[in-house]
Amino acid sequence: MKQPKHRRYFIGAMLIALLFILLVSSLVYAWYIHTQDDGLPIFITRILLPLAVGAAISSVLVSYLYQKNNFYVLLLPAERYAAHRFVLTFILTATAIVLFQPLFTSIRYNVGKVLHLQSVEEMPAYEQPTFLSLGEWHVDRMRVIPIHTYENGKGWNYNKVHLKSLFLLPIFSQKNAYQNAAKAWLAFKYENTISKEEFARNKGRPYFEQSLSHFKKINVGAFLYFELYDQGTEKQVLTQLARNHSYFKSSYSAVYQGNSVDRDWISLRYFVYTLLGFLLVVVPIYWLIIRYLIAIDGDDEQSLRHIE
């Protein structure tokens, strides 16, 4: 069924506002990740950034739409004007946060700060670029620091135990390995979830042994580049492990993970995820919401009776 002209304008305004929220959030994050070392907790850049931008932009748009053409959420009393505006603001902000998740990853791999060095010995003190590309480097699995941890599940996973194995290696130059302090650190992570009953029987030892066995078999030197480990509890644990290593120096505490997949390919893949999410999920959901849950001045009398 063809939508009334004013209703099509309403849907269009919502979609344009969503795209504008994503654009502003993307520009702010792109500037940050391209010019600064990524030292902020990922929750700030991934959740709070689109939340703040979305709330600011959507509140202005919703107020404008309400003044120009009164709208009503059919599930709420007609006299609850503030509630109607809040629901629409919430819808815009929530969908912006969801769509920003794959877009966040795309931007990170596309414009994240990259440091190209011929040797790891050229690594500047106190710097932690998002991506590190090295011409020559050396790691030795015999210098590894392993740690195995477990954590009881929460919420829906209250009857589960989350197991995690972290391995940390110092990164040296091939030319003078072990002669100087490590200029960066390479981390490997294994994780699994088992039931509390199984954990009570074996304390997760089979899993820990399996992760250690796999770590001994992999080629720890076969990476195209390194990406900075995400901020959080794991990063703090790894940094503390590095501090206990004999080759640690406080001015070189950056912890990285190895990656062998081209950054441009990863960026394109997550941008496609964002585009598909917008076209195949958000647009139909917005259409359904505006079509069946929102009444707008100018609708026929039968539609407006639902709000009386």
Image: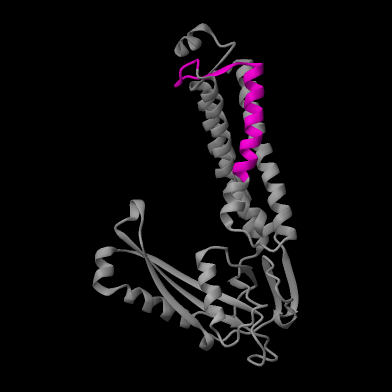
Asked if 83 appears above or below 150 in the picture, the reply is: above
- Judging depth in this view, the residue of 19 and 221 nearest the camera is 19
Which residues fall within the magenta stretch?
50-79
Q: Is residue 127 visible?
A: yes
Q: Main secondary structure of the magenta part?
A: helix
Q: Residue furthest top?
A: 301
Instruction: State how the image is colored.
Output: one colour
Residue at screen point 44% across, 21% down: 75
Where's the N terminus, which quadrant? top right
Residue 110 position by quadrant: bottom right
Asked if 176 appears above or below 56 in the picture, the reply is: below
Residue at screen point 44% across, 77% down: 147
Residue at screen point 58% across, 67% down: 229
Say left or right for 203 vs 78.
Answer: left
Residue 28 position within the rendered picture, expressed as x and y whole percent measured from the top left: 71, 49
Residue 161 position within the rendered picture, expressed as x and y whole percent measured from the top left: 34, 63
Residue 74 position within the rendered picture, expressed as x and y whole percent measured from the top left: 47, 19
Q: What number of labels is visible?
A: 0
Q: Is residue 70 shown in magenta?
A: yes
Asked if 112 appears above or below 281 in the picture, the reply is: below
Say left or right for 100 vs 175.
Answer: left
Q: Is residue 82 shown in magenta?
A: no
